[in-house]
Amino acid sequence: MRIGKHCVTFTVVLCLSLLAGGGDAEARRSRRTPDVDRLTKAQKLALRTTATVRAIKRVGRAVIAITTKKVVRRNPFHRAPYGYPHRYQRRRKTSSLGSGVIVSKKGYAVTNEHVVSQATDITVKLADGRRYKAKVVGAARNFDLAVIKIQAYAKLPAAKLGTSKDLMRGETVIAIGNPFGLSHTASKGVVSALKRTVRIKGRTFNDFIQTDAAINPGNSGGPLVNILGEVIGINTAVHRGGPGIGFAIPVDRVRRVVNDLLKYGKVRGAYLGMGVYDYNGPGVAVSGVQPGGPAAKAGIRRGDIIYSIKGQSIVDVYTFRRLVRKLIPGEKVWVKMRRLTVKVKVISLSPQKARALFEQRLGFALDSAAYYARRMRLQTRDGVVIRKIVRNGRAWKVGLRRGDVIKRVDRHTIKSVADMNKAALRLLSGRSVMMIVQRGRNSYYVTVPY
């Protein structure tokens, strides 16, 4: 009997403990999912404030709506109707909308180059409704990026630039801009793909971020933001094939371009330290390597066949030049050759150094024709004169001599040493260069191996 009583007692205690435990579990569940009706306004707001909302709040104040007025010339081949010549000869003013993001409290903002191209008047509108005038500080057409300065005396809210090195496919991103004039619109999506090649209005861009966040006309120049509220790209284009395919410029490239635009007003010329020429086959052949240059340090030799740079196939010298012009000093690019694949660090090349390399390759020294006009009894003051020439050099072998005045190099008209410096930057890679040379009162064409 005692054993039975103890069993009954134990059973009752166990049931009561189980019931108490179940009640505790239910209480814990109720604490995890509280009754919404019993929450205060502050508690409800805290629950609704997600990471996406916090990211938009963090960056939204720095996003601007850009309105530009552009002057479009009429088509010179357009025939005006009889009796209305003046009406059709006038310029036509148009307005366009775009977006941008402030990156400095001093009022510097980043946008696309095509947003402010040919603009005669720029007005920006902040998220709080303030309006200011702005002017272009610098623009890089090859990268479709521009920097504008907002003419405001007060400090402006600035967005934080993140990094695009560690982006992941599927990562949540937010596009903020002004599509179709609807100011400060946010759309959410993911990173669909990386390193996309995009062709926009006859121009080819690489390394773009692809996203399915809604991007429409008016979003151009606005920021692409990660879930932490950091800018990881600048929205640039949308695929014509259908919605859900947008493209943005990675912020690491944006940062390098903006630094050059703020410091120099333009993007510095990229230099790889080698020349190339076309040959019978895919790719281009290396005609020469500058000692101590980036290509030489990477192990590239004369005669190597280059197939691609930064993943972009090279068909001819024109393609090579176009790709080099879109490189940014400081970045490292993969160069694929027949012999091996190497990583080359891109460096900057000043116009003066470019002219020095040009003179070294051709074997002469150039100076201002205006300065030496009297001393050498020149018949012109425009152009650059050959002050010294190396016997049996490339220029000597084609017939050039001391006192000859160079008036044109390829498609570049030369009137001063500064013009020669700019032209030399375009002649870093090629097989030959054509020049117009004046000797006495006569001018003639000459082609010099380069």
Image (cartoon, rainbow, N blue to C red):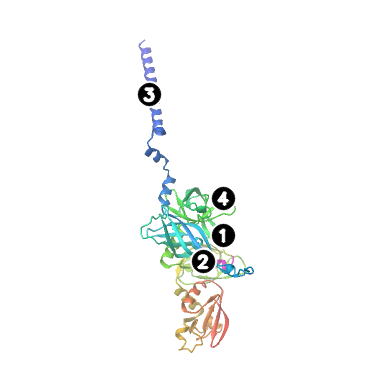
- On screen, residue 205 versus residue 256, left or right, reads right
Q: Amino acid at mark 1?
A: Arg
In the displayed structure, 371 sits above or below 125; it is below
Name the residue: 40% across, 38% down.
44
Extent of the magenta region = 315-323
Q: Work out how far the residue at label 3 is from the one at label 4, CA to CA, in angstroms.
A: 56 Å
| Residue tagged 2 | 324
Determine the image quadrant of residue 432: bottom right
Depth order, front residue of 233/344: 233
Q: Amino acid at mark 4?
A: Pro
Which label sits on residue 350?
none
> In this rendering, which labeled residue sits more in front, label 4 or label 2?
4
Depth order, front residue of 327/124: 124
- 1 or 4: tag closer to the N-terminus: 1
Name the residue: 51% across, 60% down.
95
3 and 4 marks in contact (CB < 8 Å): no
In the displayed structure, 437 sits above or below 142; it is below
- 3 or 4: tag closer to the N-terminus: 3
| Residue tagged 4 | 243
* Tag 2 secondary structure: helix
Depth order, front residue of 13/124: 124
- On screen, residue 375 versus residue 202, left or right, reads left
Where is residue 255 drawn, in percent x and y? 43, 60
- 4 or 2: tag closer to the N-terminus: 4
Q: Quadrant of the N terminus?
A: top left
Where is residue 252 drawn, in percent x and y? 45, 58
Q: Amino acid at mark 2?
A: Val
> In this rendering, which labeled residue sits more in front, label 3 or label 1?
1
